[in-house]
Image: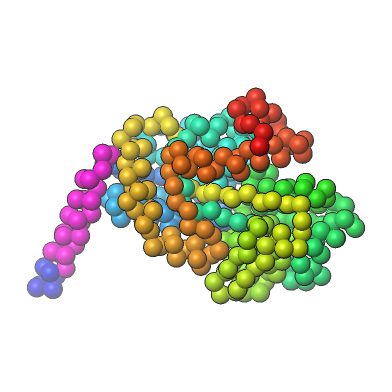
Amino acid sequence: MMRISVLAGVAAFAFAATGAQAQQYPWKPDKPITIIVPWSAGGSTDQVTRITAAELEKTLGQKIVVVNQPGASGSIGTRNAMQAPADGYTWTAGAAKDLGTYIVSGLLDTRVGDWRLYLNVANVSVLGANPNTPYKSAQDVVNAMKAKPGQVSVATAGVNSSGHYGIEALTRALGLTYKHVSYDGGNPAVIATVAGETEITTQLAVEQAQMIRGKRLKPLAVLSDKPLELEGYGTIPPVTASVSGFKPDTNYFGIFVPKGVPEPVLKTLDMLWENVVMKSEALQKYAVANGALYAPSYGDAALNAALPAIQNTAWLLQEAGKAKVSPDTVGIAKP
């Protein structure tokens, strides 16, 4: 009986402490919060969002439920977040450049300015090959695309995804073509390459990390101008070390909240990012283990960080003939 009483007392203290933390913020949610991840489970967005949600729960004192709603290159789940009641209880997540270019690709009528951005990490794409392919470097893939235009198969999470942007940016810069194979999320695209359905994937390092460590994918290069240190594997060279004429962008990920929600919600999230996310050991460990860059920011700073990739992605779509709406007609200036 004494043991039960002591445990009960500890539990009550813990609950009171959590409640006290929540009292410091202007918004005190009285029901669970939903974050819609518009991609499949196990992908880069899903991974980092679940870690971030767990960090926020500790301080906010309320359950945060992560729901996967993949489809249409992330636009279905994002649309559902837009159409939810503007009470602050429904957020979405993903890459900021995707959010800012849905309108250009014709997938969703929204602009990055319609949302408040809360960024957590920056991710980089990796040129990963099925181990049975003959490719040993990024230059080998480039040579194959030159020799066999439109035949080298590349798996991505679909148009507007980070993987698709990575291969489009690379091939457009070098005047190459390839065979695009689209999947409903980064994890399925990676698994498809492991299974031999495609030769290459350009999904993010966080989505390929486990398969790279298990030697089920060959990381030929990171689509960056800097090498990537992946825990449990070693160094993946930058694509710029062997291929010239290509300058990659920084791809920021985070949680996005519609601006029409009550002001106390946004103020509370600003404070949580400042006090919790920007000091999160869990997110830092995740970044190191998965080949991501821990880069939290929010508000205007987040928007300024994300804009270059949004601009470049939008105009890449335009120049590739895949834009449904011209970027300059929706306020996206040419970089």
Q: Is 309 situated above or below 225?
A: above
Which residue corresponds to the image point at 66% horizontal and 41% vertical from the top-left? Answer: 313
Which quadrant is the C terminus positioned in?
top right
Q: Residue at x 51, y 67 (%)?
A: 289
Residue at the image position 24 percent from the left and 48 percent from the top? 22
Answer left or right for 286 relative to 25: right
Where residue 152 sits, quadrant-wise, is bottom right
Q: Position of residue 131 (x, y in %)?
A: 74, 71
The magenta segment: 7-27
Residue 253 in the image: x percent, y percent? 52, 49
Tell me the residue at 62%/71% (across/down). 235
For residue 111, say whether it is visible.
Answer: yes
Q: Nearer the viewer, residue 117 or 17?
A: 117
Residue at the extreme left of the image, as rendered: 2
Q: Residue 285 lies in what quarter of the image?
A: bottom left
Q: Is residue 97 above or below residue 187?
A: above
Q: How many marks?
A: 0
Q: Please check the rendered image and state whether residue 238 is part of the magenta-colored stretch, yes or no.
A: no
